[in-house]
Image (cartoon, helix red, strand yellow):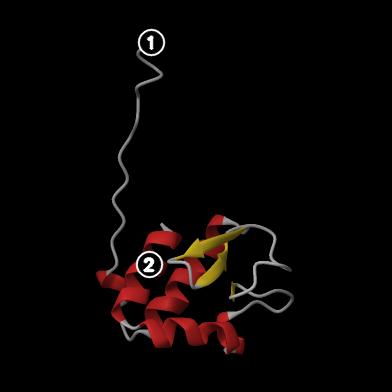
Amino acid sequence: MLIKTCEILMEMDEEKFLSFENLETMNGKKRKYFSTDPNGMREPMDIKGKIYVETLMSSNGFRNLVIKLLKEYNLKISDYKIYLRADYSELNQ
């Protein structure tokens, strides 16, 4: 969810997204959530080969980061929908 959101937002405005590396409000108190250098991050995931996002965080951490991202892009949080699909394939075997 976080990775796909980051990819979509980067397509909307790449320059703004890359600037998150240097914004204090878009990073944690002790560690960076966005960086062009994966060293120093615990579980970085590559976003379109240009920046890394930290993925080692709680579910609430993911939610809070997505909310921050949406606010930076002036998007309504209420317009952001996530659809989950149940996968019962292993239960039927």
* The C terminus, quarter of image: top left
Dividing the image into 4 quarters, which one contains the N terminus?
bottom left
Picture coordinates of residue 13 (x, y %)? Answer: 33, 83
The image shows residue 13, relative to residue 42, as above or below, that is below
Disc 1 residue type (three-letter):
Gln
Query: Which amino acid, mark 2?
Result: Glu
For disc 2, the marked residue is 7
Query: Which residue lies under the disc numbered 1?
Result: 93
Q: In terms of secondary structure, where does tag 1 sit?
A: loop
The residue positioned 40% from the left and 19% from the top of the image is: 90
Query: Of tags 1 and 2, which is closer to the observer?
Result: 2
Image point (37%, 67%), residue name: 7
Marks 1 and 2: CB-CB under 8 Å? no
Q: Residues within 10 Å of mark 2 (few under 14, many from 20)?
A: some
Between the residue at mark 1 and the residue at mark 2, the CA separation in whole angstroms equals 36 Å
Q: Residue drawn 35% across and 22% down?
A: 89
Q: Name the residue nearer the viewer: 7 or 74.
A: 7
Q: Position of residue 42 (x, y in %)?
A: 69, 60
**Residue at horizontal 65%, vertical 76%?**
28
